[in-house]
Amino acid sequence: MTSEIILAGFGGQGILFAGKVLAYCALAAEKELSWLPSYGPEMRGGTANCSVCISDKPIGSPLVLNPNLLIAMNLPSYAKFIGAVQPGGKAFIDSTLIDEKTDRTDIEAFYVPATQLASDNNLSGMANIILLGKLIKETGLFDLELIRKGLEKCIPPKKANLIDSNMKAIEIGFNF
C-alpha cells in the first residue's frame, strides 16, 4: 500500500510540521517514506505545501503530483490541488477558511471546520493537527499510540508540554 499525501496552506499554519509528524509515524512503523517540503520566501503568510509518501515498497520519487490524500487549509491551496487528487482519493478541507465545495464525485471530501474547532477548544494554531486527526481516522494509516510517538519526536523537549494539547487536537479531528 502506498499513500501519497499533499498537505497545503499558508506559511504559519503548521503544514510542514503536520507532514513531519506523518513522516515520523511512518518511520516508527518501519515503512518506506519521503517528506518533501515546499514553501515561498515568506516566513508567515506565504504558501507552503508538503509531499509525504508512505509505502510498504521503496519509493521511486518523493514528488507527489497526484495525491490520493490531500489536506487543504486555505482557498489557494484547495484550488491548486483539489483537481489533482486521484479518483478514489480523499480530501480533508478546513471549511472554516474554505467555503467552496468540490463538484468531484470520484473522491471523498471531508469538510472539517478545523480552525473554528481549534479556537473553540483553546487550541489556537492546531487546526493542522485536527485535520491530521481526521485523516488518521478516515484512512486507518496509523493508530493513536503511533501518532503520539510521532508528536513526541517532532515537538522539541523544551515544548514537551504541548504534546497533550496536540493529542487533544488529534482526538477532536478523529472524533469529528
Image: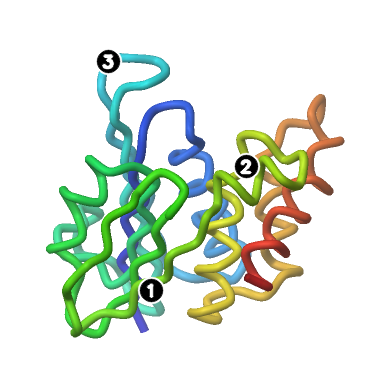
Front one among 69 and 62: 69
Relative to 64, 12 lies left or right = right
* For residue 60, above or below residue 2: above
Residue type, label 1: Ser
Amino acid beneath label 2: Met
Instruction: Say which of 73 and 113 sits in front.
Output: 113
Foreground mark, 3 or 2, reads: 2
Q: Earlier in the sequence, mark 3 or mark 2?
A: 3
Residue denoted by label 2: 126
Residue 35, image x, y percentages = 38, 49
**Amino acid type, callout 3:** Pro
Q: Indicate the position of residue 79 as horizontal and vertical percent values.
A: 18, 50
Q: Is residue 150 left or right of residue 61?
A: right
Q: Which residue is mark 1?
A: 55
Residue that extends furthest to the top in the rendered view of this protein: 42
Q: How many residues crowd around disc 1 within 10 Å: few (fewer than 14), some, or many (20 or more)?
A: some
**Mark in the foreground, 3 or 1:** 3
Count residues near mark 2 (Cα–Cα under 10 Å), then give few for <14, some for 14-19, many for 20+: many
Distance from Cα at disc 3 to Cα at disc 1 = 31 Å
Q: Quadrant of the N terminus?
A: bottom left
Q: Which residue is at the front of the view, 29 or 5?
A: 5
- Name the residue: 77% across, 39% down: 122
Q: Could you tell me which residue is drawn at 31 percent across and 51 percent down?
A: 51
**Which type of secondary structure does the marked residue at label 3 adopt?**
loop
- Choose the circle earlier in sequence order: 3 or 1: 3
Select label 1 or label 2 by which is in front: 2
Q: Secondary structure at mark 1?
A: strand
Figure check: 125 above or below 149 = above
Q: Which residue is mark 3?
A: 41
